[in-house]
């Protein structure tokens, strides 16, 4: 829970609660009084930025969302806001010598994070590259479709959010709807984003995706264990992105992300960069690592490496 | 207070009265605005999926128009400098028309941004104290600040000049001069900040070139003033305002210099990219020659190039600059040329190919075109309203009466041949 002590140093705090309350009362009076829906509609309209919510306010928001999703999908949905775990900085490793380009990670991610199925939104994009050109993005092919992968003469490079230490997307957001949490995950407050898409222009990894249309998510496919900053259902007109499965890794310390679990060849590694015994530290110290677009100084916590 | 109220009532009377041509013009604009509103309602209903924008090309026609119109708003400053800094009389009389154009262009800019964002219902998140304006971190926050400042500044200046003129008084220099002087750096700032908005993104090599801001300024001082030159002639023909030829030619000369700088900077940019031939050439290659069989923008950008170069020579050579036929051809060429070059020609190649090398060919949908048309109509509508009040004031056909309160309105027939107006005043 965000509170005075653990709040991000850069979060602005304004005392506009009273003003909002007054305005909400006036506008609420315009809506049909005693009706439950309009009240929650106004509440949603006047909701503060996530980092400015007090504990009771946050609980109210989460309860409202759970109710709203329950009504929409006809099943009980849990929306948590588990805070970062102290002493954890998440890192990711991707073994380019093992990846076969099967895209199971892509669909594992879609499933876990409640992405829209219609239109399809993918947080992971897998690039097929030719061995002789190396990592030449101009020659990358995302829409390869052979009967069997891997294809001769090619290697595969999945790209997702690199959870930069110096994230350009956070810098450009005009309303601070996206920020870097203390465990290194860059998140979006879907209820604060205005949908200007400046962050999408700024991201060098194509990791940010926009809801051009109301997400098409069948109730049967909905994963009900959600996080406010992660896989809860998104509204139309906002940006979303990979959060290292924030709902998994914060609620169950040590748990892997969905893409790590989905990978059939063990090309994906995930863990705590601050744990000297952890697998991420092991691979950084013992394997050949490279950073995509290191010249942009984004300092990703996403390491490509060659295990063999 | 009562005086201001009477003045306001007078302006309302003025805008509601006019010739047949005036009514026809205004009604057709209103119809186009209604079409725009319908298109916007359709977009709100279905989401931005009704545009051709997608994750690969996340900005399109709306932001292109926005970028171009920020440039048009510069027309004001090109008139303000000779008029108020150098006190050059022929332009001083008409500088207010430039400021009004800036106001209309700014309103269009803000409308284009509004229709582009996914959640217009959350616009209040941008308002400091209510929401969170990420200033000074985000260049978009800077843009919000400078665009609104420039809009308010020009509106205040234009209304103040008109009101003083109406009262047959001189503007108070202590209040007026600082504002006028401030409007010059403000005009420079809107272009610089808008350029920096693109310029600051290391992920997009096509925009990430230091030359971008100077190029913005140079092309801005072409497009806005070109529009003004055509407008001066229209006003001269249909109202009793006397705009001297030398004022028009002076503006044309300034456009020639600006266009030279614009073309020179573009050449510098093209040389660097093509000669060094790095991976960063791809967007420019896409723009000028196409990439892997994708070449939507190619015919447009070459049209723009030919238009801009032709116009440059038309404006450079005194004989063609001072011949109204060739001058007007040049103005149209420049306006269209810069519209392509600083609109879609700037925004789209920044996003094609995308950061992972994907090529998504963008072309605006019908919804986008209709909505843009509606916004342009809104701009023209606002500008016509402003002119409808300003022109009678400048020609002395709308002024405060001898009692110092009630307005006197001589002109009730807006948009007519000037000779008919002259005849009328002769008979009066």
Image (cartoon, coloured by chain):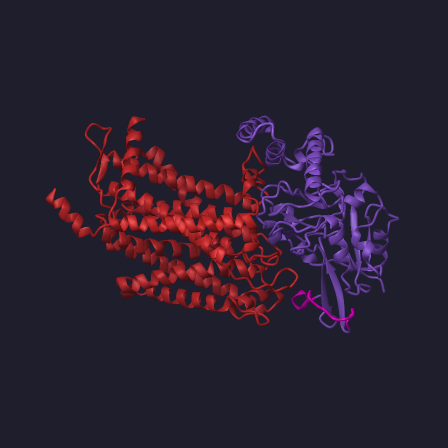
Chain colours: A purple, B red
- Measured from the top left, where is residue B127 in percent x and y? 54, 37
Toward the viewer: A281 or B334?
B334
The structure residue drawn at horizontal position 54% and vertical position 50%, both measured from the top left corner, is B197
- Measured from the top left, where is residue B395 in percent x and y? 22, 43
Q: Is residue B114 magenta?
A: no
Q: How many marks?
A: 0
Query: Image height check: is B9 above or below B280?
Result: above
Q: Main secondary structure of the magenta part?
A: loop
Query: Image height check: is B347 above or below B162?
Result: below
- Measured from the top left, where is residue B95 in percent x and y? 31, 46
Toward the viewer: B62 or B19?
B19
Asked where in the image residue B54 lies, by quadrant, the reply is bottom right
The structure residue drawn at horizontal position 80% and vertical position 45%, both measured from the top left corner, is A249
**Is residue B194 in sight in this rendering?**
yes
**Is residue A164 in sight in this rendering?**
no
Region of the chain picked out in magenta, as a range: A136-151
Query: Image height check: is B277 above or below A253?
Result: below
Q: Is residue A145 magenta?
A: yes
Which residue in the rendered view is the most extreme toward the left?
B427
Location of the N terminus of chain A (image quadrant): top right
B306 with respect to B141 (left or right): left
A52 with respect to B150 (left or right): right
């Amino acid at each position: 829970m965000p509170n005075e002590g653990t709040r991000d140093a850069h979060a602005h705090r304004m005392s506009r609660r009273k003003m909002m309350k007054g305005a909400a009362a006036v506008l609420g009076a315009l809506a049909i009084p005693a009706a439950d829906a309009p009240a929650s509609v106004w509440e949603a309209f006047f909701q503060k930025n996530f980092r400015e919510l007090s504990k009771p306010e946050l609980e109210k928001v989460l309860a409202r969302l759970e109710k709203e999703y329950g009504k929409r999908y006809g099943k009980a949905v849990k929306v948590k806001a588990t805070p970062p775990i102290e002493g954890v900085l998440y890192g990711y490793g991707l073994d380019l010598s093992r990846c076969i380009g099967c895209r199971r990670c892509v669909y594992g991610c879609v499933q876990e994070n409640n992405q829209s199925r219609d239109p399809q939104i993918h947080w992971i994009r897998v690039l097929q590259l030719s061995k002789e050109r190396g990592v030449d993005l101009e020659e990358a092919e995302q829409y390869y479709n052979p009967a069997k992968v891997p294809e001769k003469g090619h290697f595969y490079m999945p790209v997702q959010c690199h959870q930069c230490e110096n994230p350009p997307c956070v810098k450009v957001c005009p309303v601070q709807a996206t920020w870097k949490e203390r465990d290194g995950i860059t998140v979006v407050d879907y209820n604060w984003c205005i949908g200007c898409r400046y962050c999408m222009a700024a991201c060098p990894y194509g990791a940010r995706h926009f809801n051009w249309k109301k997400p098409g998510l069948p109730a049967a496919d909905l994963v009900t264990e959600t996080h406010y900053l992660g896989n809860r259902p998104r509204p139309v007109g906002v940006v979303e992105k990979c959060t290292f499965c924030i709902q998994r890794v914060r609620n169950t310390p040590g748990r892997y992300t969905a893409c790590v679990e989905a990978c059939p060849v063990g090309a994906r590694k995930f863990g705590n960069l601050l744990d000297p015994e952890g697998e991420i530290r092991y691979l950084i110290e013992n394997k050949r690592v490279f950073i995509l677009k290191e010249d942009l100084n984004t300092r990703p916590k996403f390491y490509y490496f060659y295990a063999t | 207070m009562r005086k201001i109220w009477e003045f306001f009532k007078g302006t309302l009377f003025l805008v509601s009265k006019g010739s047949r041509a005036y009514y026809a013009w205004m009604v057709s604009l209103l119809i186009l605005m209604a079409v725009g509103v319908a298109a916007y309602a359709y977009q709100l209903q279905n989401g931005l999926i009704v545009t051709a924008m997608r994750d690969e090309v996340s900005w399109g026609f709306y932001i292109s128009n926005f970028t171009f119109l920020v440039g048009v708003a510069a027309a004001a400053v090109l008139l303000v400098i000779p008029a108020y800094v150098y006190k050059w009389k022929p332009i001083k009389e008409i500088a207010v028309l430039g400021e009004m154009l800036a106001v209309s262009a700014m309103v269009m800019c803000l409308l284009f941004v509004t229709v582009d964002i996914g959640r217009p219902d959350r616009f209040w998140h941008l308002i400091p104290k209510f929401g969170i304006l990420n200033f000074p971190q985000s260049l978009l926050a800077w843009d919000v600040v400078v665009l609104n400042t420039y809009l308010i500044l020009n509106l205040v200046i234009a209304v103040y000049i008109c009101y003083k003129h109406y009262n047959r008084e001189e503007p108070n220099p202590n209040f007026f001069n600082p504002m006028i002087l401030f409007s010059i750096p403000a005009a420079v700032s809107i272009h610089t900040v808008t350029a920096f908005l693109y310029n600051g993104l290391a992920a997009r090599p096509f925009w990430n070139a230091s030359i971008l801001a100077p190029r913005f300024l140079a092309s801005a001082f072409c497009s806005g003033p070109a529009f003004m030159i055509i407008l001066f002639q229209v006003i001269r023909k249909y109202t009793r305002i006397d705009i001297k030829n030398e004022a028009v030619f002076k503006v044309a000369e300034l456009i020639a210099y600006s266009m030279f700088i614009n073309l020179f900077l573009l050449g510098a940019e093209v040389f660097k990219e093509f000669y060094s031939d790095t991976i960063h050439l791809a967007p420019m290659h896409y723009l000028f020659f196409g990439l892997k069989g994708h070449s939507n923008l190619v015919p447009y950008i070459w049209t723009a190039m030919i238009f801009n170069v032709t116009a440059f020579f038309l404006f450079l050579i005194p004989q063609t600059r001072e011949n109204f036929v060739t001058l007007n051809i040049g103005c149209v060429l420049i306006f269209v040329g810069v519209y392509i070059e600083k609109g879609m020609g700037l925004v789209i190649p920044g996003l094609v190919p995308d950061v992972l090398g994907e090529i998504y060919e963008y072309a605006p949908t019908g919804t986008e075109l209709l909505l843009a048309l509606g916004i342009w109509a809104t701009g023209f509508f606002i500008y016509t309203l402003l002119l409808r009040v300003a022109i009678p004031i400048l020609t002395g056909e709308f002024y405060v009466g001898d009692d110092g309160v009630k307005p006197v309105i001589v002109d009730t027939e807006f948009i007519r041949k000037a000779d008919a107006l002259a005849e009328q005043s002769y008979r009066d």
